[in-house]
Amino acid sequence: MAGEDQLISGMAGRYAGALFELALEQKAVDQVKTNLEQFDAMIGDSADLKRLVRSPVFGVDEQLKALEAILVKAEITDIAANFLRVITTNRRLFAVQAIIRGFRQLVAKHKGEVSAQVTVAEKLSDTNLDALKGALKSVTGGKDIDLDVKIDPAIIGGLAVKVGSRMIDSSLRTKLNAIKFAMKEAR
């Protein structure tokens, strides 16, 4: 399954595909997706968890011990919890965010949705999120949108949207860089 989609390749794609097939077989796709999105959000919110996930300094035992505490606190169970344990044991926890992205793409494809990655400077209100989904839905021919929203204060303002191979970057950082470049050219 992972090999069918060019966007999902390599080790992360293989893990995402295997997890998707298992979740589909167990009729737990939505539950697994929710749990993985929750774990992904926790990584984004915690510098310590991000370091635990990405750093090769931590051994498997340390990562598993910390992961168990996180799973209990977040109430992540069943397939998602077991999957996170497996990738930790296999020393693949560093790739968990890529695996989650791949899993989300497979779920979206299965449901006939379009995946969109959006980067914003600060958290969007529900009203703005709904407006963004509506705008993207009209651009994609009425398909449902699976939004993956990342917060990156470095873009200063505006947003960057990626739908499939199309990228629209209307961030303030990009606009300022363009002005700076234009000013250098004018000299």
Image: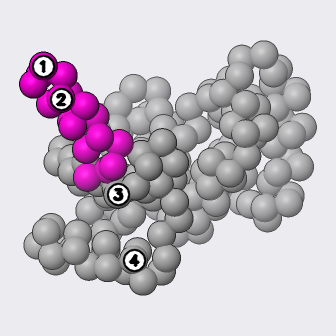
Q: Amino acid at mark 3?
A: Gly
- Could you tell me if the residues under marks 2 and 1 are in contact, i.e. CB atoms within 8 Å? yes
38 w.r.t. 134: above or below: above
- Mark 2 lies on a secondary structure that is helix
Give the main secondary structure of the magenta stretch.
helix
Type of amino acid at the residue the image marks with label 2: Met
Closest to the camera, between mark 1 and mark 4, is: 1
Mark in front: 4 vs 2: 2
Residue 108 image position (x, y, % from top left): 34, 61
Q: CA distance from mark 4 to mark 2?
A: 33 Å
The crowding category of the residue bearing disc 1, from other C-alpha atoms within 10 Å (few below 14, some 14 to 19, many at least 20), is: few
Image location (x, y in percent) of residue 104: 43, 55
Left or right, residue 39 beside residue 6: right
- The disc at residue 128 is 4
- Checking the image for residue 183, the label placed there is 2
Circle 1: residue type: Arg
**Tag 1 residue:** 187
The local crowd at label 4, few if under 14, some if 14 to 19, many if 20 or more residues have their Cα within 10 Å, is: few
The structure residue drawn at horizontal position 47% and vertical position 33%, both measured from the top left corner, is 12
